[in-house]
Amino acid sequence: MNIDKLLEAEATFLQRYPGGFANEDMRAIGKKHNVDKLSEFAATALAKKSFNNQGQVLEDITKIVTRSSMISMFEKPKFRDFVKGMNQQDRELLTQGFYKMIHGKKEKGFNEVLDILREAKLAKWSLISICPHHYRPQHDVFVKPTTTKNVIRQFELDKLVYNPKPTWAFYVGYRAAITEMKAMLSPSLSPNNAAFTGFLMMTTAVDQ
């Protein structure tokens, strides 16, 4: 990790936006991405007891995907239609996978959800990472391919090798790197992990 580049990015960002994400301009941008509202929704929708109602929890997972500004407009209807058309057995497996990924054996759940999404060619980083992020916005990360690749390159995260095929090992490694980077910088840059990676995105050399 290139700490000098990271500190330089912090200084440049805070000079332009004093107060970080509390800055009026950044608050206006943040409102467009409804991260806080979706995380409030996810706190209830994805709570342990909510998984007792399979139909409702899958409907709410679909709402998180389709309402998120971070998910591609092309992926939203594909995910919604896939879940809607699943048979009962696959719906149960998907529900169990999400439960484990959020509340239980996380790696096992991650891989189970991934296997099911792969059937519909929807095994994408965005779809596998959006729900954990909204449930634990200060802990879990949303993996946006272009942003992630640029962050790895710009800040020289040499231990991480991005692959478009999601893996638990990369997810854990990227999350650990984001946690480490956050700890070095002003808390004003990380009201949540999506905001922090947004800050990193805005300071990378390549336009997003």
Image: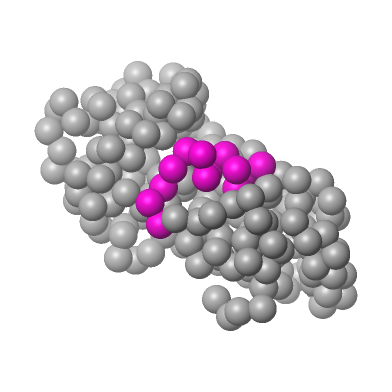
From the image, give the main secondary structure of the stretch colored magenta. Answer: helix
Range covered by the magenta-colored residues: 164-176
Q: Nearer the viewer, residue 137 or 167?
A: 167
Q: x%, y% of residue 195?
A: 66, 57
Give the residue drawn at x 76%, y 51%. 181
Pick the quarter of the image with the N terminus: bottom right
Give the residue drawn at x 84%, y 51%. 184
Q: Nearer the viewer, residue 88 or 174?
A: 174
Q: Quadrant of residue 198?
A: bottom right
Q: Is residue 175 magenta?
A: yes
Q: x%, y% of residue 202?
A: 67, 72
Q: How is the image coloured?
A: one colour
The reply, left or right, for residue 86 in relation to residue 194 is left
Q: Is residue 139 at all visible to an observer of this figure?
A: yes
Q: Quadrant of residue 164?
A: bottom left
Q: Is residue 98 at all visible to an observer of this figure?
A: no
Q: Is residue 137 magenta?
A: no
Q: Is residue 82 above or below residue 89?
A: below
The reply, left or right, for residue 75 in relation to residue 177 is left
Give the residue drawn at x 31%, y 58%. 76
The reply, left or right, for residue 174 in relation to residue 58 is right
